[in-house]
Image (tube, rainbow, N blue to C red):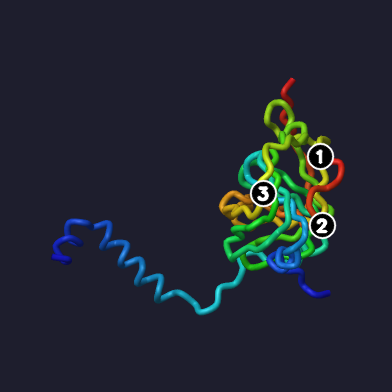
Amino acid sequence: MSERSSEHNPQRAHSQQQNNQRKKFESPKREAILDLAKYKDTKVRVKLMGGRLVVGVIKGYDQLMNLVLDEAIEHLKNANDEISKDKTRELGFTVIRGTILVSISPVEGSEVIYVQTSE
Amino acid sequence: MAEILPLEVIDKTINQPVWIILQSEREFTGTLVGFDDFVNVIIQDATEWTTSQTTGISEKVMEHHGRLLLSGNNINMLVPGGRRSGN
């Protein structure tokens, strides 16, 4: 019965095979993909799911990429739903959830090469 | 310097005012009672706000008396100490 169903469901048979392979290659300890230690105490720009942009100094982080930012500032949006450069609000000392993090990059060492203007 | 862990920061905020910002324009302030690994949160005497993402102006939506369970699913940010003055 089960043999038959996997015969008729090649996708399932394939995923089972993949599972076995994953088991074989899995190492006991997983390292974080990005070592945020380098960015500690540096100013970073963090984009979140939902379109928020927060700039702040990294004070802490964990394996799940939850962040602790100090002097955090959120950039508000302009009328066209684009992120504004100068309209901000102050958050201060903030915890950001790693589950909704989209991107993170240092403020120093990056520059704007193109700004979309609505006019 | 000792590492600052995010969940430790949240843990230290228990019994203190907290400001929770969701993915939408909704925000909650109140006293943090507790949280779990998913950062589902319980807040005491919460105030619910909508904050325009263009103007940053907050409007009070309602006040919740007693405890309120807030799903961690939609939480973007937690600010210990509550809402910054001027916000």
Judged from this view, the residue extending furthest toward the bottom is A28
Q: Position of residue B87 (x, y in %)?
A: 82, 41
Choose top left, top right, bottom left or bottom right for residue A2.
bottom left
Which residue is located at x 63 percent, y 68 percent?
A63
- Mark 2 — on which chain does it sit? A
Instruction: Give the residue number, with chain letter if any, for mark 1.
Output: A88
Q: Tell me the kind of residue under disc 1.
A: Thr
Q: Amino acid under label 2? A: Asp
Q: Tell me the residue that label 3 is attached to.
A: B65
Location of the N terminus of chain A (image quadrant): bottom left
How many angstroms separate mark 1 from mark 2 (CA)?
15 Å
Q: Residue at x 30, y 66 (%)?
A: A16
Quick one: A104 or A53, which is closer to the camera? A53
- Residue A100 lies, in percent from the top left, at 61, 52
Mark nearer the N terminus (1 vs 2): 2
Q: Which residue is mark 2?
A: A70
Cα–Cα gap, marks 2 and 3: 31 Å
Amino acid marked by disc 3 = His
The kind of secondary structure element at disc 1 is strand
Q: Nearer the viewer, mark 2 or mark 3?
A: 3
